Image (cartoon, coloured by chain):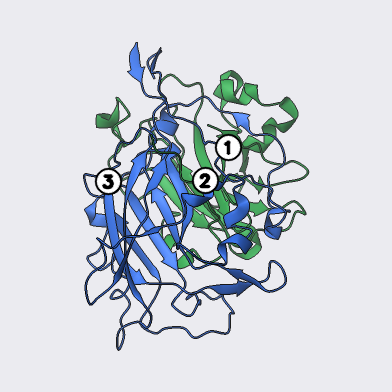
């Protein structure tokens, strides 16, 4: 049996190939669900912005279905929602996604978004999850419970009162104080 | 009850660590807390789906996809390979995104300040989808080595960057392909980020004379293996 190919860093020069414009906007006019913005920064161990990183997200549609053959409910998935987004972290390490609030996947307690971070200086990506601070189901989520209580907050995006679309703040700290919880799926 | 396929985790005996001080940029960017085990769910067994509509005809020919007034300079090469999972099963419709320096070792990117010429006829970016047998191929120019500031007189060995979307979230991979016999490999802290020689060797393409096109281009083969199904399927609640 063949063995896994090792990862290597995305490096600083991926923009021309991986950032083609618009992939941080996951919705179009026909997408069903409540529009939200996700805004955050990627920060290093000194709290300095990572200006050459790449953040990817993967999520269910507004009803909790995935447009993918492994989902037994694929037929009901929103055909106007792909579920994948990515953004490079530019000025001050900032990234923004415009998407919809995911529904709760059948069998799960609460909605979340899968997040993956790549950067120069990371030989391999890091995987985390974005939960929402206005979801009561978080109390029942087994993964949140598996994380030490004093670190759980790093996984929870916080609703911000803005004039814009409902906005959730999710900063990713690669290292140091309040280091984001990263997973080994 | 539904039978589901779970997937192997990343193989940390083969994969590079986050912290690898010889590659100095890891020092402040490496997560230092242990990773938390994550039970796989439908969110991990699914992922973006790509099709032919996302790939344009010249996307797999970097010698032609950015031509302005002539051919790009350098040594034409053809790179072919398969995308497989660890069980040896081919992954069809895997999207590969490719980027690289030109033959002089310069990227078309605003952050690349290396004092080597840009090539007006070479963007160094492309994309290709695997076919039903998991096979891909693209034409490009052999990239040059280039200096970087990691340590005194540091040079990256020639490489091509690959971004791979396999069949699901767990099969995502970003890596680099190197060339056989490159004397810079032994000196490169990124390539040597993997402690395991077997793992490192998987990133070195092989010269493939059967791929080499007479009077046109040298051939190289580079297979890519992503996480595969776990050997023991198990029953779980409806997911």
Chain of the residue under the numbered disc 1 shown in the image: B
At horizontal 44% and vertical 72% (from top left) the residue drawn is B143
From the image, tell me which residue sits under label 3: B134
Q: Are marks 1 and 2 in contact (CB under 8 Å)?
A: yes
Chain of the residue under the numbered disc 2 shown in the image: B
Q: Which quadrant would residue A149 be assigned to in this image?
A: top right
From the image, tell me which residue sits under label 2: B199
Q: Of the two numbered discs 1 and 3 on the same chain, state the one appearing first in sequence.
A: 1
Secondary structure under tag 1 reads loop
At horizontal 44% and vertical 39% (from top left) the residue drawn is A3
Give the quarter of the figure containing the N terminus of chain A. top left
Chain of the residue under the numbered disc 3 shown in the image: B
Q: Of the two numbered discs 1 and 2 on the same chain, state the one appearing first in sequence.
A: 1
The circle on residue B13 is 1
User: Local crowd at mark 1 within 10 Å, few (<14), some, or many (≥20)?
Assistant: few
- Check the rendered structure and report the hue given to chain B: blue
| Chain for colour green | A
Residue A21 visible here: no
Secondary structure under tag 2 reads helix
Q: Nearer the viewer, mark 2 or mark 3?
A: 2
Lateral position of residue B179 relative to residue A74, left or right: right
Task: State how far apart marks 1 and 3 are (Cα).
Answer: 26 Å
Lateral position of residue B87 relative to residue A131, left or right: left
Question: Measured from the top left, where is residue B120 in percent x and y?
Answer: 39, 85
Question: Measured from the top left, where is residue A35 in percent x and y?
Answer: 44, 44
Q: Of the two numbered discs 2 and 3 on the same chain, state the one appearing first in sequence.
A: 3
Lateral position of residue B141 relative to residue A160, left or right: left
Q: Are marks 1 and 3 on the same chain?
A: yes
Task: State how far apart marks 2 and 3 are (Cα).
Answer: 21 Å
Lateral position of residue B163 relative to residue B189, left or right: left
């Amino acid at each position: 049996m063949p063995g896994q190919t090792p990862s290597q860093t995305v490096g600083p020069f991926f923009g021309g190939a991986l950032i083609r414009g618009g992939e941080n906007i996951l919705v179009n006019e026909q997408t069903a669900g409540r529009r939200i913005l996700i805004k955050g920064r990627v920060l290093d161990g000194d709290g300095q912005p990572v200006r050459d990183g790449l953040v990817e997200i993967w999520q269910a549609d507004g009803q909790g279905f995935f447009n993918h053959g492994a989902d037994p409910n694929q037929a009901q998935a929103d055909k106007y929602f792909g579920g994948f987004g990515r953004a490079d972290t530019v000025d001050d390490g900032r990234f923004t996604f415009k998407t919809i609030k995911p529904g709760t996947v059948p069998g799960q307690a609460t909605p979340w978004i899968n997040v993956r971070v790549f950067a120069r200086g990371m030989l391999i990506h890091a995987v985390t999850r974005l939960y929402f601070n206005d979801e009561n189901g978080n109390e029942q989520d087994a993964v949140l419970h598996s994380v030490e209580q004093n670190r759980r907050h790093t996984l929870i995006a916080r609703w911000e009162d803005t004039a814009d679309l409902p906005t959730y703040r999710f900063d990713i700290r690669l290292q140091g104080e309040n280091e984001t919880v990263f997973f080994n799926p | 009850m539904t039978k589901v396929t779970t997937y192997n985790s990343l193989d940390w005996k083969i994969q590079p660590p986050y912290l690898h001080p010889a590659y100095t940029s890891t020092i402040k960017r490496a997560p230092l807390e242990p990773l938390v085990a994550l039970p796989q769910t439908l969110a991990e067994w699914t992922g973006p789906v790509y099709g032919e509509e996302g790939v344009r005809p010249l996307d797999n020919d970097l010698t032609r996809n950015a031509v302005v007034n002539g051919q790009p300079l350098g040594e034409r090469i053809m790179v072919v390979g398969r995308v497989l999972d660890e069980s040896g099963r081919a992954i069809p419709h895997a999207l590969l995104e490719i980027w690289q320096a030109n033959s002089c070792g310069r990227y078309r990117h605003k952050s690349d300040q290396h004092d080597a010429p840009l090539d007006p006829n070479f963007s160094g970016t492309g994309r290709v989808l695997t076919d039903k047998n998991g096979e891909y191929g693209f034409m490009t120019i052999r990239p040059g080595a280039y200096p970087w500031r990691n340590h005194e007189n540091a040079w990256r060995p020639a490489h091509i960057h690959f971004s791979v979307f396999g069949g699901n979230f767990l099969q995502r991979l970003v890596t680099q392909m190197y060339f056989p016999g490159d004397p810079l490999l032994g000196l490169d802290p990124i390539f040597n980020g993997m402690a395991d020689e077997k793992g490192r060797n998987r990133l070195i393409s092989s010269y493939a004379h059967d791929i080499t096109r007479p009077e046109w281009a040298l051939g190289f083969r580079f297979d890519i293996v992503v996480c595969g199904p776990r050997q023991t399927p198990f029953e779980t609640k409806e997911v």
